[in-house]
Image: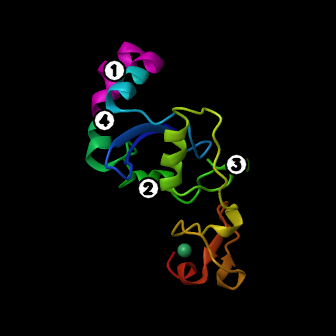
Amino acid sequence: MGTFIVKMADEKGSNWYFEYSTISDSVCTTAMTRDEFEKYYRDEYGRRAMDFDFGERMKRVDAKGTSARMDESAEDTIGSCDRSGTNETWLSPKQVLELAIAWRTDPKHQIEGVDHDLICCMCGKPIASEADRVWQSDDECDPLHTACAGKG
Ligand SMILES: [Zn+2]
């Protein structure tokens, strides 16, 4: 399963649902309300999927923010490998939500993200300076904070 349902709240506390692909590491639908998302899912995957797995998946989404069994939250699913930004740059989970909401009115909207060489693959946060960066060669998601390098 490479496509997950995630739920995130915006600043006003409204919940938004969208799909996120861990194959392309990017958001793949606009943000939708619960009703809109249910309709989308039915149109996209059909009645069989509604009976078969929609309820189960949404139970996980409502409990922890993601349908991914291994993840604890939407932030976990989106994580440090995100490529939703312009030219496959990294967006924070908050920016991913912002982008998915913007697509509701402007499907071509883009957000300029951070280059992957500047994102720590352990904690998923930007690395501020060259001096704080170490490389890990056996991982496709390479750079780490010096402090994070000792933890893995
Ligand atoms: Zn780090």
Task: Say few, some or many: other residues with alpha carbon within 10 Å of mark 3 (under 14 / 14 to 19 / 20 or more).
Answer: some
Instruction: Quickly name the residue at label 2.
Output: 75
Residue at image x 44%, y 16%? 43
Q: Amino acid at mark 1?
A: Met
- Which callout, 4 or 1, points at the residue further toward the start of the chain? 1
Residue at image x 53%, y 49%? 96
Q: Amino acid at mark 4?
A: Met
Placement of 105 over or under 111, stated as above or below: above
Residue at image x 48%, y 55%? 94
Report, in whole angstroms, how far the alpha carbon at label 2 lies from the one at label 3. 20 Å
State the extent of the magenta-drawn residues as a range. Answer: 42-56
What's the mark number on residue 50?
Answer: 1
Q: Quadrant of residue 109?
A: top right
Report, in whole angstroms, how far the alpha carbon at label 1 lies from the one at label 2. 25 Å
- Which callout, 1 or 3, points at the residue further toward the start of the chain? 1
Q: Are marks 4 and 3 in contact (CB under 8 Å)?
A: no
Residue 100 left/right relative to 115: left
Instruction: Quickly name the residue at label 3.
Output: 86
